[in-house]
Image (spheres, rainbow, N blue to C red):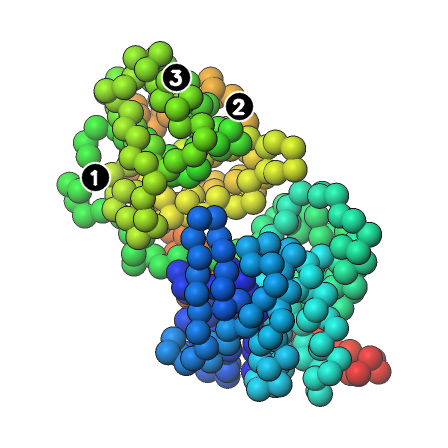
Amino acid sequence: MRVLMISHACAAPINRGKMKNLAPRQGLEMSLLVPRHWREGGRVFETESGDGEGFPLHAGDIFFSGRVGGHLYRSGLVRALMRERPDVVHIEEEPWSLAAAQLLAFLPLCRPRPRLVLFSFENMDIDLHLLQRSIEHRALSRADVLIAGGVTVRERLLARGARPDRVVVLPQFGLDTEIFKPPAEGERPEVFTVGFVGRLVHEKGVDVMISALAGLKGEWRAIVVGDGPERVKIESTVREFGLSGRIEFAGWVDHFEIPDFLKQVHALVLPSRSVGQWKEQFGHVLIEAMSAGAVAVGSNSGEIPHVIGGEGLVFPEDDVKALAGLLQKLHDEPEFRNRLSSLGRQRVVKEYGWESIAEKTHEIYERAMRSRKSNAAEGDE
């Protein structure tokens, strides 16, 4: 089975773990198309075509670099389709995106026409204009399998008219469980330590965590990793509570430093709050924390409860008292904390390791190919 994946997110090499685990699988011939030049936050990723990662890598020039739903390939897309002659095209772009529309226009040129697997990560009922709604309707009708990045994404796709039998829930990204692993004995501090990793912005709710920590009894410390426009305000709140000696602001660190940080904390808090046209889409740091043996504690914003499952703790958005109660329990009951730590690690290995994500993605490709045979039998081909 020949599969071409198209993904702007994979312009960042760190996001190619799924590809690297799919490529060696028996019965699969994987290839990848990414933008040659992609802006993500304050970083720019440059990619050249080649085979150095164990699969053919195509780099295409695009219009509107950095616009997730608004970029177009001005070169590379047709070349990749013609050269790879895929049985399945797996596009990790929203069903309303211009890139999805471009692919839908080119697929009829391929003979035989590939099966289409389309990934979506949007979990809000965003206001789409007429063209976007038209693109989305066509994409949802044409896709043989729709991959929803979470339960809340699936709910949105169904509300938009997707057929339930074509929607599968599977995260876009997993992790290397041997990189994000629990610390060796004695490596994690004895003092109960709470951590946060992410942008210091209003919607991430760091102020809720600070307020909850202010009432925490006993010996403890906290580390905040990240930066953003709310940092000055949050640091001021910390001083007002008299917690400057207990809460460390580490600033922004490279992603490769996160595993060592997570070995230093007993609990990782993600106190996100839903605002306007955003709610938490996944919270990847939650599975990183669980993989490293830290207990995941998150609000009920968006996808967080589904990511944590029963192997972590969930509290209502903006509920300082509820969060404080959970942290106090983790502080006071080491056996309870250790049990959740072990269960969280097991959950990540089973559900979110790259190998597991690759296996489930392979099954989706096989499902798409079965769809081809079913449609052919019905006279659709």
Residue 161 visible at all: no
Comparing marks 3 and 1, which lies closer to the viewer? 3
Comparing marks 3 and 2, which lies closer to the viewer? 3
Residue at the image position 70 percent from the left and 84 percent from the top = 110
Task: Work out how far the residue at label 2 is from the one at label 1, CA to CA, in angstroms.
Answer: 29 Å
Identify the disc placed on residue 157: none
Q: Position of residue 142 (x, y in %)?
A: 76, 68
Q: Secondary structure at mark 3?
A: helix
| N-terminal label among 2 and 1 | 1
Q: Which of 280 and 169 lies nearest the eye of the viewer?
A: 280
Neighbor class of circle 1 (other Cα within 10 Å; few <14, some 14-19, many 20+) is many
Corner quadrant of residue 179 = bottom left
Kindly identify which residue carries mark 2.
318
Comparing marks 2 and 1, which lies closer to the viewer? 2
Task: Work out how far the residue at label 3 is from the one at label 2, CA to CA, in angstroms.
Answer: 16 Å
Kindly identify which residue carries mark 3.
237
Task: Work out how far the residue at label 3 is from the one at label 1, CA to CA, in angstroms.
Answer: 27 Å
